[in-house]
Amino acid sequence: MTQVSGGTYQSRGYHRARRAKRWTIVVASIAVLGLITAGVLNHFKIGPFSDKGAPVSFGQDQAAGGGGQAGGADAAKPDSKVLMPTGPAAEFKNADTLGDGTHIAVTTLEGKKSGFTGKVWVWAPKEYKDPKFKDHGFPVLIALPGGPGFPDNYWMGTNLKLQSSISKWYAEGKSKPFLLAMPVLNPKNNGTYWDGSDIPGQPKMGTWLTDDVPDLMKANFRTIKSRDGWAFMGSSSGGFAGMKAVLKHPDKFKAAIASGPDFYPDSPLWKGHPKERDENDPKLLAKDLTARKGPDVYIAFQYGTKEDPITISGVKNFVKEYGQGSVHTMVKEIPGGKHDAYTYVPSMGQGPIQFISEQLSDPIPAS
């Protein structure tokens, strides 16, 4: 056999084959590692694999026009309850993506009625884009946080599973397929609470929650015209603000879930304004609503057995004294539950979400 530098043709071919095999393994390994890395980065919403910040549309192009019908002259007439998106369309950016492909999006809302500018996160269940619901309105649940409530609203995070739970409860027949609005609750994070109210001389957070945020939802989503499509939920100070909003504006909102709520407007900013403070006291509002004989409202309370006794007694006393006449209530006691959102969300599916859903309208799918 002819010899060449570096060995025979046979041995040279053998080494080439080995090197080619090694490089094939290396390239394949890099490819697999790349796919794994991409999957991990996408899962954690990192770098170029993230859709965070991407524009999100909820079909605002269906905005009312030509009598409020969607899709032009040949479109089916919407049901009588629906309010088609009124516009103008907001600029939503993706904040998170759920496993079912739905998006939690965020926009900065300049409140025309309150004069306050702040962030609002929104979410629509997958049914919202189902063609069979295209001419129907969805109920809105305005979700309010406890704690500072600024610059974020903790319900916008997927860790608490509020959005996925609503989808699950709807599939189980316990809940309406709610649209979620998750606004900031306070204008600052400085240890002060604005009690979800229009305190004289302060940012009008009451008007922000009960006018501007609903107007945002009406502008961008198919909603329900009447109060039968509007409710609040919240925990701690957010539970107070949501419950109070329903009692103060029963013409606009019909129901609330109040988890571990406060029961008295105790912001130090009320100093010198006792009349306005009393106009935002849930107990006085409930008493007045019953005296006026409605309209009826529905409040589902929750508390954990490990919460502050003041919170527990607050719920029990309110229900005993004011949960009558036009104010309909239910109470869910959570064994071993603490004063936190991780306690409240699973418990909502054990009665409270069904209690308020039974009082609210839902989209009727096309046959």
Image (cartoon, helix red, strand yellow):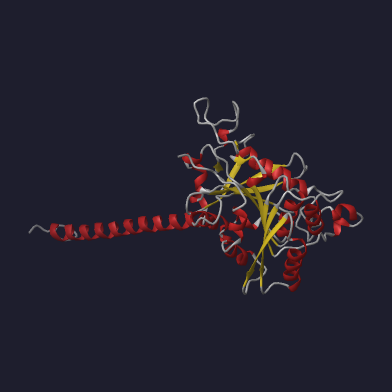
Where is residue 50 drawn, in percent x and y? Answer: 51, 50
Q: Quadrant of residue 154?
A: bottom right
Q: Nearer the viewer, residue 152 or 351?
A: 351
Q: How many numbered tags mark residues here? A: 0
Q: Nearer the viewer, residue 70 or 16?
A: 70
Q: Is residue 270 left or right of residue 7?
A: right
Q: Quadrant of residue 15?
A: bottom left
The correct choice, above or below, for 309 with respect to 5 in the image is below
Q: Residue at horizontal 74%, vertical 56%?
A: 325
Q: Is residue 79 left or right of residue 144?
A: left
Q: Residue at horizontal 84%, vertical 52%?
A: 279
The correct choice, above or below, for 41 with respect to 133 in the image is below
Q: Is residue 324 left or right of residue 69?
A: right
For this orientation, the residue located farthest to the right is 272
Quadrant containing the N terminus in the rendered view: bottom left
Q: Quadrant of residue 85?
A: top right
Where is residue 28 drawn, in percent x and y? Answer: 32, 57
For this orientation, the residue located farthest to the left is 1
Where is residue 173 drawn, in percent x and y? Answer: 51, 55
Q: Residue at horizontal 56%, vertical 36%?
A: 79
The correct choice, above or below, for 107 with respect to 345 in the image is above
Q: Nearer the viewer, residue 246 or 115?
A: 246
Where is residue 122 drawn, in percent x and y? Answer: 61, 48
Q: Residue at horizontal 79%, vertical 47%?
A: 204
Q: Nearer the viewer, residue 252 or 236?
A: 252
Quadrant containing the C terminus in the rendered view: top left
